[in-house]
Amino acid sequence: MLNMLTRYFLRVAGGASRPVFYDIDAVYPDLRELENHYDTIRGEVEAILPSKQEIPQYHEADSTRSHISSGEDPDRNWHVLMLYLMGEKPPENRALCPETSRLLDAIPDLYQCFVSILEPLTSVPPHATTYGGYLRYHLPLIVPEERPPTMRVKDQMHTWSEREAILFDDSWDHEVFNECQSIRVILVVDLLRPMPRIADCLNRLTTRCILRPFYGRPVAKNAVVKTPKRALV
């Protein structure tokens, strides 16, 4: 069913001609409020980085992502601090970034939000989302200046720079190339894909009634930090 819905959503979005990157101001201007509070968000994230090993790796939160994040492969060391997942709000995680969480809650049509911490020399192999009901926003918080990591989305390349946000469709095949010697940290925000009324209603209904109980809740539970807040600060 989800595969059928994804095919339908992507067809509505333009099929093979749908955009790779989107204009933030034209599609989701509310996201600019995150950039307006960049220093606050970065400050909260920097405070937890000394204990980042207590933050679950992606595959620990979501076992279906083991092909792109695996503890058995030192080249795929990727931590994610989940802050919002289809209506689920892990309180332990959000307590670490309270102002960031407050800012996120003010943005309409949230689907998923997390802090992505990619370790040095950690690349991410080609992959694409299995559900096409959202678009993905990146707000780069910490990006090494020397040999900064790059991302290929479909046939387009992008190099992250701090403060320079992007909005893209991660239903396209994409991968990350990372040869830098320090961490890359990005605030990832997924938002419901703008679509005509029928498709939009189907997307919201699927997210609320299927994805949240069967995916969002278990992943949010697995994504909780491994120690109390006082041990992380």
Image (cartoon, grey):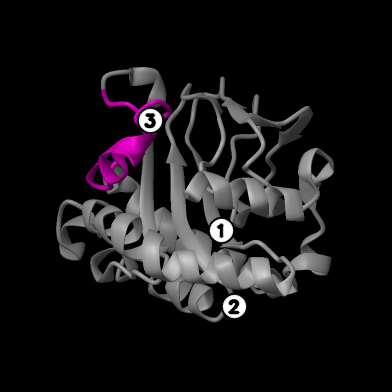
- In screen coordinates, is 89 left or right of 4? left
Classed neighbour count for the residue bearing mark 3: other residues with Cα under 10 Å, few (<14), some (14–19), many (≥20):
many
Q: In which quarter of the image is residue 53?
A: top left
Which residue is denoted by mark 3 in the rendering?
A: 69
Q: Is residue 149 visible?
A: no
Q: Please state which amino acid type lies under the numbered disc 3.
A: Ser
Relative to residue 136, is residue 27 depicted above or below?
below
Q: Please state which amino acid type lies under the numbered disc 2.
A: Pro
Q: Is residue 101 visible?
A: yes
Disc 1 to disc 2, C-alpha distance: 11 Å
Q: Please state which amino acid type lies under the numbered disc 1.
A: Asp
Which residue is denoted by mark 1 in the rendering?
A: 190
- In screen coordinates, is 152 left or right of 84? right
Residue 59 highlighted magenta (yes or no): yes
207 or 220, which lies in front? 207
Range of magenta residues: 53-71
Which residue is found at the position 36% from the left and 41% from the top?
79
Which residue is found at the position 35% from the left and 40% from the top?
58
**The C terminus lies in quadrant:** bottom left
Relative to residue 127, is residue 34 depicted above or below?
below
SS at mark 1? strand
SS at mark 2? loop
Relative to residue 133, is residue 174 depicted above or below?
above
Disc 1 to disc 3, C-alpha distance: 19 Å
